[in-house]
Image: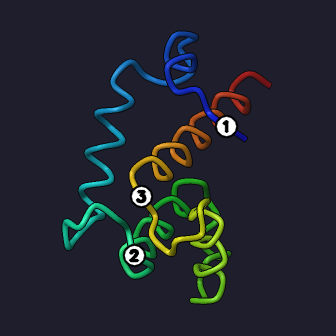
Amino acid sequence: MEVNINQLIQYDILPKNFEEIAKQKFEEFDKNKNGYLEFEECAELIIEVAKFMKYENFFQTDEAKKRLYENFDKNGDRKFDFNEFKEKLAMQFINLYEEKMK
C-alpha cells in the first residue's frame, strides 16, 4: 500500500510534525549513522513498537524479528532506509487512527 504522507497530514491523521518525528526516531535507532537500519538496529525498534502495540510476546525470537524486518524492507535490499521507515511509521498511525474511529 502506497502511503501519501502529505495527504495524511492534511486530513489530520498524521501530526503536522510527522516528518520531524520520523527523522528523529530513525536517527535514534541508526546507531552507526549510515542512513540505514540493519537487522541488529531494527531489532531494537521492533521490540519498542511491539511493546507499544502490546505484541511484545509475539516478537521474542530472532526468527520472528527477522520475518518482520524482511516485511519492513520493501525493496529487498536488506537495508531499511528512511523512506521505508517513514512509511511503516505512517501505517502505524493509520492503524491507531482507525482503532480510535471505531
Of the residues under marks 3 and 1, which one precedes in the sequence?
Answer: 1
Q: Is residue 10 above or below residue 81?
A: above
Give the alpha-carbon distance from disc 2 to disc 1, as whole Å. Answer: 23 Å
Disc 2 is placed on an element classified as loop
Percent coordinates x, y for residue 81 in the rendering:
41, 58
> What's the residue at 45%, 47% (across, down)?
83
Percent coordinates x, y for residue 10 in the rendering:
52, 10
Give the alpha-carbon distance from disc 2 to disc 3, as whole Å. Answer: 9 Å
Q: Which residue is mark 3?
A: 81
Q: Which residue is mark 1?
A: 2
Q: Quadrant of residue 34?
A: bottom left
> What's the residue at 59%, 69% (across, down)?
76
Of the residues under marks 2 and 3, which one precedes in the sequence?
Answer: 2
Q: Is residue 93 above or below residue 71?
A: above
Q: Residue furthest right?
A: 102
Pick the front one: 58 or 41: 41
Disc 3 is placed on an element classified as strand
**Circle 3 Cα neighbour tier, 10 Å, few/some/many (<14 / 14–19 / ≥20):** many
Of the residues under marks 2 and 1, which one precedes in the sequence?
Answer: 1
From the viewer's perspective, is 70 left or right of 46? right
> What's the residue at 59%, 84% (across, down)?
60
Pick the front one: 99 or 82: 82
From the viewer's perspective, is 64 left or right of 14? right
Mark 1 is on which residue type?
A: Glu
Q: Is residue 25 above or below residue 99?
A: below
Q: Which residue is mark 2?
A: 38
